[in-house]
Image (cartoon, rainbow, N blue to C red):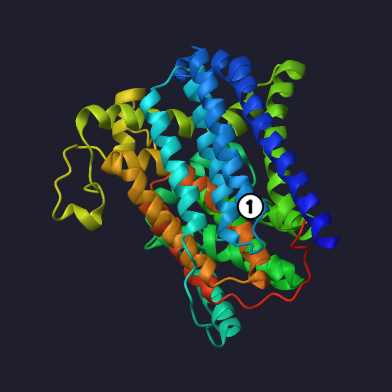
Amino acid sequence: MKNGSSNKIELSVFFRSFLVIVLYRLVLDLSYILVISRFFNYEGYYLIINKLKVLESYLFLIVLGAFILVFIYFRIRVFPSEFLLYLLFLFTYIPLGSLYALCDKPRLFFYYSTFFWFLLIFMYYVFPIFKVRRVRFSKFLFLTCTILFNMAVLFLIFKYLGISFNFDLSLVYEIRSRYVESNIPFAGYLFNWVGYAINPLFLSYVFNKRQWLTFIFSIFIQLLLFSQTGLKSFLFVPILVLGVNWLYQKYGSKKLYLLTTLLIGLTVALGILSYFLMGDIWVSSLLTRRTFYVPALLSFYYYDFFTSRGFTYLAQHRLFGGFLKYPYSLNPPHLIGSVYFGTPEMGANNGILGDSYMNFGFLGAILWSFVLILFFKILDSFCDMDKNEVLIGPLAVFANAFTNSALLTVMTTHGFLILLLFSIIIPKNRIKYRSEG
């Protein structure tokens, strides 16, 4: 009886999650029709509804949505990178399908993205995790490495910028300019590694352990990074990490997916209500257009440009530039900024979809999905149920990174590889949690 009851619960959550995914797409479409296309038409967000493409995009969404949810809700073992994979589905594929249908974008690239996502989901659930040995003295290594990295950041900020705090969002561009001009050694890597990988992981660990003194220190470093670099993401990372951790602990791994989709959909709906009730488009611009539709639009621009001019085959990266010739005077983000926005200074960075196609064309779907899943499986190999709730919040941070930046950039500059290395030495977490929703 217990197994039958459990299966009914799983089935119920599955259908609710599936319904919420479709509703999320509907709300995105409404936001695009009522707000985005009306006020941001000059940026390329035209309203050209193609009924056949609307039907196509919803059919593929239903198939892929069911595909990923079946594996999520009917598997016994839960792995942390699965949540990141699901967030990427919400952040990349669904908005791209919306733009494809409502702006009459190229069918071939939409099919490419659908194929890419089919491969990602298939590989993730078919490929096994690796057998690895546990690391001895992991707690000592984890705390020592974390403190050393944090102290290095503290030293560099103190030496080159001074210790001060700013919470005025209107000054971020001025602060960012000052930070760039300071030319701090290794800051481009070190600050990102600490702010996006090491500190979120440490924050999650000490929060779960209720170690409040070290928790305050972790928040202090995060606020200092925001104040001295002007990068708003450093400010919002703790909110995201702690929010995901709280949902995971309170509702369990299964309901986390349902609630996350619901919250994202409500955020998009909030932007629509904000416009109709107060005439304000700021919420829709920042949370809907910037988060979901800008990466989707840029993906189509990358497809358009590199289809007609040839692929880069990684020649734009320093690692490969020595023996591969890069044919342009500008790097890809500034190239797209120059051609499609008339602003060479604009860095029109794109995520895994545009990046994979830019480098290898249709072969990129196979190569990049394989590389991404390989690293996800390595990460999962070092995790057990005790580590899940420590990792799941920090991993959510990288959903935005993979949506807006090239794969190799996320791995190196943004610190995903650092997160992977630190996941090996995370001490076991003994706080009780709910694994079933």
Q: Which x, y percent locates residue 183?
A: 37, 55
How many numbered discs sit on the rendered protein? Answer: 1
Q: Residue at x 76, y 72 (%)?
A: 431
Position of residue 206 in the picture relative to residue 132 (left or right): right
> Could you say which quadrant of the image residue 265 lies in?
top right
Q: Residue at x 61, y 64 (%)?
A: 391
Q: Is residue 209 above or below residue 84?
A: below
Query: Which secondary structure, mark 1?
Result: helix
Q: Which x, y percent locates residue 347?
A: 37, 37
Residue 356 makes an appearance in the image: yes
Q: Is residue 355 above or below residue 77?
A: above
> Could you say which quadrant of the image residue 22 lies in?
top right
Screen quadrant of the N terminus: bottom right
Screen quadrant of the C terminus: bottom right
Residue 413 makes an appearance in the image: no
Instruction: Identify the residue under disc 1.
Output: 72
Identify the amino acid type marked 1. Ile
Q: Which x, y percent locates residue 110?
A: 42, 29
Residue 259 versus residue 196: which sits nearer the camera?
259
Single out the residue that lies furthest toward the right: 1
Position of residue 309 in the picture relative to residue 234 (left or right): left
Position of residue 109 in the picture relative to residue 52 (left or right): left
Residue 111 versus residue 139: which sits nearer the camera?
111
Q: Which x, y percent locates residue 152?
A: 48, 71
